[in-house]
Amino acid sequence: MDLSLDADLLARLEEWKAGGLYRELRPTQGIEPNFASNDYLGLAKHPALIEAAARATAQQGTGAGAVRLVTGTTREVLALEEELAAWKEKEAALVFSSGFAAALGTIPALVGARDTVLLDKRAHASLIDGARLSGATLRVFPHNNLEVLERMLRATEGTRRLIVTESLFSMDGDTAPLRELVELKEKHGAWLMVDEAHATGLYGATGAGLLAEAGLSSRVEIVMGTLSKALGSVGGYIAASRPVVQWLLHRARSFVYSTALPPGVIAASHAAVELARGAEGAARRETLGANIALFRDHLPAPWRSAVPGAIQPLLCGEAEAALQLAAALRERGFLIPAIRYPTVGRHAARLRITLSAAHEPAQIKALLAALPSAGEASALPA
C-alpha cells in the first residue's frame, strides 16, 4: 500500500470526482453577463473606486508593509473605520484582511473553553471555524429555529453564551428573524453576533443592512461584514462598542498578526461606503430591486421560490444535476457555477444566481429565456 502524501491525496480526489464534487480553477474574465458575483451594487468597476485606488497606490505604494500594530495603521484606514462605525450605528469598527479573518479572530477573542457558542446550522464556514477555534462548547440549532435555540439557552445558563447568525444567508438568500433573536438573547442574557456580509449596501435607508432597517443596531453586540460584496472591494470588519473593538485589537489573532490591507484597497473601500450611503447608492438599490422583481416574476416554474432578494438559488438536488445545468448555461454564455457539498448539504446542490444593479433588463430576460432549455439539457423537470 502506497502511503505517500501524493498517493493518498490522489485517491481522495478520485473519490470527490466520483461524487461530482471535484473543483477546478478556471479564468472567468470576459464571460458576460456574470450572474455569480456578489457585486450587488455594481461598484467593483465604478470610476470613483478605481480612481481612489489608483491615487492611493501612486501616493503610498502597493502594500501596507506590516501589521496594523506596527506600520499598517494610516489616517485613511482610521477614517474608514470611523465611517463604518457611523454607518452601522456603533461606537467603533475594526477592519480585517477579509470577512473570514474577521470571524476567525473575533469569536475566539470573545469566548473560550468555559463558554458556549450557539450557531445557526446554515451559518457561513468562517463562523463555524471561528466557533470551533474558540474552544467553546458549540451548539448548532436548526436553521432559524427559535424554539430549539431557546431550549439551548435555558440549558446553558451560567455560562457566557454567544449566538451567531447571518442576517441574510449567503446560499439560500433568506433572512434571520432578527427581532425575535434580539428579544431572545436579551431575555436570557446572551450576546448576539450578526454577519451582515450579504445585506450591507442593500437594506435600510442608507444601505446599512437589515439590522438598521429593523431599528435593531443598538441592541446587537457584534456586527460583522465585508467590503468585498456590495462594496466592490476586499476586506472585512467588525462594528461594535468601543470596549469590544479595543479588546479585539489586543486579542483577535487574525487582526494582530495579519499584514494590513494595501492603501489602494482602503481608499476604494472608503469611496464605496460613501457611494453606498448616498444618493447614488439609493438609486442603485432601486435598480437592483427592479432587477430582482423582473427575475422573480418570470422565473420558470421548476425553480420558482419565495426568496425576495439578490440571491436566487436554483435548487437541483444532486451535484451532477447542478453541474449539468451550469454547463448548459455556460454554453449559452452565462457564468453561474454549481454550488455543491460541502458549501451546501450533500443533496442540496444548486446554482446560486446573484442579481446586480449592473445587470441590464435585457441580460436578465436572456437568462430567463435560457433556463427552460438548459433545464431540459440537464434532465431537470421543465
Image (cartoon, rainbow, N blue to C red):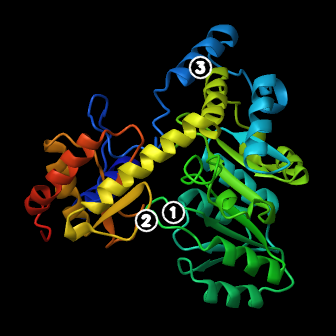
Residue drawn at 31 percent across, 73 percent down: 347
Q: Between marks 2 and 1, how big is the CA–CA gap? A: 6 Å
User: Gap in Å between the C-alphas at discs 3 and 1?
Assistant: 30 Å
Q: Rate crowding at label 1 as few (under 14), some (14 to 19) or many (20 or more) other CA atoms within 10 Å.
A: many
The residue that mark 1 highlights is: 169
Query: What amino acid is at disc 1?
Result: Phe
User: Percent from the top left, x then y, of residue 154?
Assistant: 76, 90
**Residue projecting furthest to the top:** 58
Seen in the picture, residue 295 relative to 308 is either above or below; the reply is above
Q: Give the mark nearer the N terminus: 3 vs 1.
A: 3
Give the CA separation, mark 3 to mark 2. 33 Å
Task: Give the image location of residue 295, x and y in percent.
Answer: 30, 55
> Residue 330: x percent and y percent?
19, 44
Mark 2–mark 1 CB contact (< 8 Å): yes
Say whether residue 341 is left or right of residue 38: left
Q: In this view, does 375 lie above or below 265?
A: below
- The numbered mark at residue 53 is 3
Tell me the tag on residue 172: 2
Front residue (pair 332, 140): 332
| Label 2 neighbour load within 10 Å: few <14, some 14-19, many 20+ | some
Residue 346's image quarter? bottom left
**Circle 3 — which element?**
helix
Q: Is mark 2 on a helix, strand or loop?
A: loop
Image quarter in which the C terminus is found: bottom left
